[in-house]
Amino acid sequence: MTKIAVAVLDANGLDAQISPHFGRCPYFALVEIAGQEVSAMEMVANPHYPNHEPGQVPAFIHNLGAQVMLAGGMGGRAVAFFKQYGIEPATGAAGTVRASLSRYLGGDLQGAAPCRESVEHGHA
C-alpha cells in the first residue's frame, strides 16, 4: 500500500482542487492506494497554513506517513526536504485529486522541479 499526500485548496475529497503551491495550501488529501485503487482517504488541515517555515510542511507530511507528495509546485528547498525524508515529490499536478492521482498512477505525473516563483525569488 502507498500513502500519497496531495496539496489541495478545499476539503472536497477526490474532487478537491489541486493547490498551485504545496506550502500555501489549506488542506492535504491523504490517500491510501492499494494496487491502482483508492482504499482509504482523509482530508487533513495544514497546520502551517498560510505561513510556514522551511521544512515544517515536509516534516508534517513525513509524520503522516506519506511516501509521495503531489502538488502543483514547490520550491527547491522543499523538494530537497521531501527527498531527505524519503518522500517522492511530484510537481505539475492540476485539476482535481482524482485527475492527479490518475496521472500519477499512470506514470504521467513524476519528478519535481522548483516552481518558477521559487526560482525567481532565489529559493531554488
Image: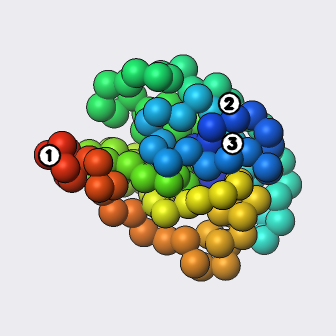
- Kindly give the residue lying farthest to the left in the view shown: 122
Left or right, 55 with respect to 16, comes to left
Query: What mark, if any, has residue 113 been given in the picture?
Result: none
Disc 1 crowd rating (10 Å Cα; few below 14, some 14-19, many 20+) is few
- What percent of the width, then of the height, locates residue 16? 73, 45
Residue at label 2? Answer: 44
Asked if 107 appears above or below 6 in the picture, the reply is below
* Relative image position of residue 33 (x, y in whole percent): 75, 59
* Image-quadrant location for residue 63: top right
Q: Secondary structure at mark 2?
A: strand
On screen, residue 23 above or below 66: above
**Looking at the image, is mark 1 or mark 3 nearer the viewer?**
1
**Can you say which quadrant of the picture contains the N terminus?**
bottom right
Q: Secondary structure at mark 1?
A: loop
Residue occupying image coordinates x 83% and y 65% = 37
Binning the other alpha carbons within 10 Å of mark 2 as few (below 14), some (14 to 19) or many (20 upward) gives some
**Residue at x 67%, y 79% (from the top left corner):** 106
CB under 8 Å between callouts 3 and 2?
A: yes
Q: CA distance from mark 3 to mark 2?
A: 6 Å
